Amino acid sequence: MSGLAGRTIGEIQSLVASGKASAVEVCRAHLERARALEPRLKAFRALLEAEALGEAARVDRERAAGRPPGALAGVPIAVKDVLCVRGAPATCGSRILEHHVPIEDATCVARLRRAGAVILGKTNMDEFAMGSSTENSAFEKTANPWALDRVPGGSSGGSAAAVAARAVPAALGTDTGGSIRQPAAFCGIPGMKPTYGRVSRYGLVAFASSLDQAGPFGLTVEDVARVLQVIAGHDPLDSTSAPEGVPDYLAALRGGASGLRLGVPAEYFAAGMDKEIDASVRSALRIAERLGARLEEISLPHTGYAIPAYYIIATAEASSNLARYDGVRYGHRARGAQQLVPLYTRTRTEGFGAEVKRRIMLGTYVLSSGYYDAYYLKGQKVRTLIRRDFERAFEKVDVILTPTSPTPAFRFGEKADDPLAMYLSDIYTVTLNLAGLPGISIPCGLTRDRLPIGLQIVGRRFDEETVLRLAAALEAELKFHQHSPPLAGQP
């Protein structure tokens, strides 16, 4: 591995600011590493080599001219292919958008550029973010850097794998039901879903608009905080963006765990969880106690209804959002159709994969006449009950700790033919999206097969500070950085 690839954001900033390395040198090192790994990893949909080197050269020119560097000056960052990057393909992992090229950046991407970040490439994903393994991509299957025969999680598997393999120090993903936190857990890195409304969704191609949220992956919790500091904040282009001030997340990292009240929900430690995950998460809880935090058992009684409620609400919104892909305005258009209905039918049949079709049909069904009240309306009522569970819990505790996933990374094909088993991979993560809460997954151990285990830390709405504070304190004690995936040590 190049001496410049595999560095944290803080280390890269220090090297570039001091002149010990140029932004162009840093960019070349990461491009070379990404290219070398790609035949095995398949993390990227596109490497934006010429554009990235041009951005890096601009950072070097500004430094030479004595201009103050941005908060992420010279830092290579990858972007999930559901977020728009001007002039680069935004396929969303789907054939229906295979040739779609946006003309402007998503707001979070524009904020990265203003901070001096170098957009290295677009990463692979489950089609339209629908999946928990990145096996649903229409183009390739991304591998897990810890075991190439296993999935990296999904739907942001490409971003998680790219960071874990040290192709980039940080990446953007999106999280609709766990799509940042679950791949972070599978790939052994920190990954954060901010509060709904904390990060602008402008330029994020919609799957489920009331659930989707962009957020960062990093090599460390500090890396996550540095990226979140840049992308967070109100955006007038997004009507769901919250007019909340952005705290100093880096300062929050120094707070430690002492005095925090940590809720441990009994419902998240139920039958069906892998025994090694249970043991590792409970070990992390004991470490938190040793650091001065106080554990309290809590109940989130409607947790068992989260998966059915989520897959009603998310599919209903997907049915509505994906209706725009009809072969008329943009995206794939079936050839030879002479009438409108055959054009729609053939375009969508050719363009969408099996999982997307399944979710569109489910969503159309629950919104249909005679079923709206029985399914969609009831799902929204359950969502309210889940949100109230968290509100009551946060009257007694500051954060909540749970496993991120009930299992470690599974093998390719292991759940591909069983949609329900795949959906249950998100059983510990979907509740946060339904309630709009912030959460982070940090690695807390390894299984006997040397597969990472994730610990999920959940906070109150817009209290990313406390989530990051505890995550940093635990990260320092767990010392997971001493472990790295086999692929990280290979050229």
Image: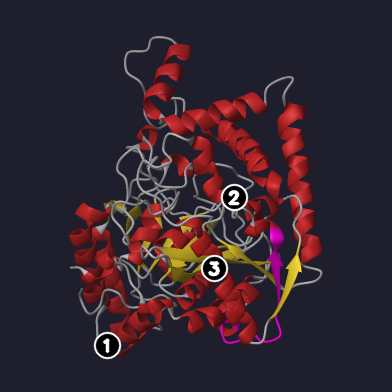
6 on left or right of 416:
left
Residue at the image position 47 percent from the left and 65 percent from the top:
453
Q: Which residues are magenta?
A: 252-266
Which one is in front in this view, the residue at disc 3 or the one at disc 2?
3
CA distance for labels 2 and 1: 47 Å
Residue at the image position 63 percent from the left and 52 percent from the top:
433
The crowd level at tag 1 (other Cα within 10 Å; few <14, some 14-19, many 20+) is few
What residue sits right under mark 3 in the picture? 279
Tell me, yes or no, whether the highlighted magenta stretch contains residue 260. yes
Q: What's the mark number on residue 143?
A: none
Q: Quadrant of residue 189?
A: bottom left
Q: Position of residue 23 (x, y in %)?
A: 27, 76
Going by the numbered disc 1, the residue's amino acid type is Gly
Render colour scheme:
secondary structure
- The relative height of residue 419 versus residue 386 in the rendered view (above or below) is above
CA distance for labels 3 and 2: 18 Å
Give the secondary structure at mark 3.
Answer: helix
What residue sits right under mark 1 in the picture? 19
342 on left or right of 365:
left
Q: Position of residue 54 (x, y in %)?
A: 26, 65
